[in-house]
Image (cartoon, rainbow, N blue to C red):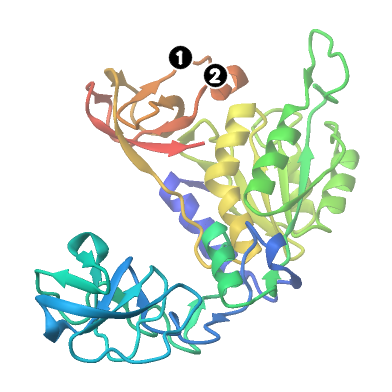
Amino acid sequence: MTLTFEQARACVLQQVGTHRSNLAVEHISALDAAGRILAEPILADRDYPPFPRSARDGFAVRSADLPGELAIIGEVRAGETFRGSVAAGQAVEIMTGAPLPDGADAVVMVEHTERSGDLVHIDRTQAGGDNFNPRGVEARLGAQLLEPGTRLGFSEIALLATVGKERLTVYAKPRVAILPTGDELVDVGQTPDASQIRNSNAWSMAVQAARAGAEPVILPIARDNYDATRKLVEQGLACDLLLLSGGVSAGKYDIVEKVLADLGAEFYFTRVLIQPGQPLVFGSVQGRFFFGLPGNPASTMVTLEVFARAAIELLSGVTEASLPFLQAPLSRDFRQKTGLTRFLPARVSADGSSVEPLSWQGSGDVAAVSRANAFLVTEPDRDQWSAGDMIRVLLK
């Protein structure tokens, strides 16, 4: 079955999103949780802030006393509490982060005051509620601050620390089997002869899978014979997801689909209208999803990033797997043949003001993909763009 890019991605999201169940969890230190997917709700353990908190250095006052000259009756710093109350005609010097004293309803910034001994002169009005954060304005006791399915970054880790959550429950990383195929492949440490290539796909796939949240398991190279490929496919099905590279085109020795079919696979699609990466296979067998990725390196990288990555993220526990396309103006005129959605090597300028399509020699050109920091993403029904036209971009 041949699908468009949009249809194929929707198929992956629907199949994996619908059929994933009983994802494994583990309990870990919050300091080890960066990049992991939260499996429990995180609740506020008290009001935040737990007291009316000054947002400025200045003076805590009664707004009804302004403008005027006020008697300074003390000061309060962050971590302290003022033992007293602000009465008419009084002010308390206050530092950022300190609790607002009783009786005060505003903070006047120090820049807007003139101090003379124990008196402070303020020649402006100040509205009640200015320059402090009321108690509980950020979150109330028991409020849900993070929901299951959230990927934890530095700000989320800071929030865990804020609420005293030293250990938490996260989804276990899915184990993703990586199975390169082909008689032309040799291990990276070997010297290939004139007809061979090093097994770069296994390395790029492992990095992409790990970046998506998986634990990659690199299997030995499957040679182009039925028995060897079937044995390794069966080994890979012990993992949560199987990624194969190569062996899914229409060649005489492309046997991956036959092996999978003989194992009882259901194929959701076998071709996608994209470049690079048209001969892409997605399905399930023995309760596991699999992708048969094309063997050319650029095709492998693109199809993993735009299709298999979504499956990995969903199996990692995220509730939505996004593909964030940006828009950038082209640096030069660009033409293409219609009919395919293309993901072409490109460089986005440092300030994001333009994107330049890079010259490349097709889906085997690893050097060109390495020079790129993004992929130019074309629309299949448009054949030309002019310099300055906006076009979709997928950052690497």
Is residue 200 visible in the rendered structure shown here? yes
Query: Residue 213: horizontal and vertical position, in percent?
Result: 66, 54
- Against 380, residue 269 (above or below) is below
- Against 216, residue 109 (above or below) is below
Residue 165 tag number: none
Of the residues shown, which amino acid type is indicated by label 1?
Ser
Residue 347 location, quadrant: top left
Which residue shows up at 46% across the image and 50% down it? 323
Q: Is residue 330 left or right of residue 303?
A: left
Could you tell me if the residues under marks 1 and 2 are in contact, i.e. CB atoms within 8 Å?
A: yes
Residue 368 tag number: 2
- Extreme residue in the front direction: 117
Which residue shows up at 22% across the image and 25% down it? 388
Q: Which residue is at the front of the view, 367 or 56?
A: 56
Which residue shows up at 33% across the image and 69% down it? 55
Name the secondary structure under disc 1: loop
Of the residues shown, which amino acid type is indicated by label 2?
Ala
Query: Residue 299: horizontal and vertical position, in percent?
Result: 58, 32
Residue to which mark 1 is pinned = 359
Query: Residue 15: horizontal and vertical position, in percent?
Result: 56, 64
Is residue 269 visible in the rendered structure shown here? no
Name the secondary structure under disc 2: helix
Q: Which residue is at the front of the view, 228 or 122?
A: 122
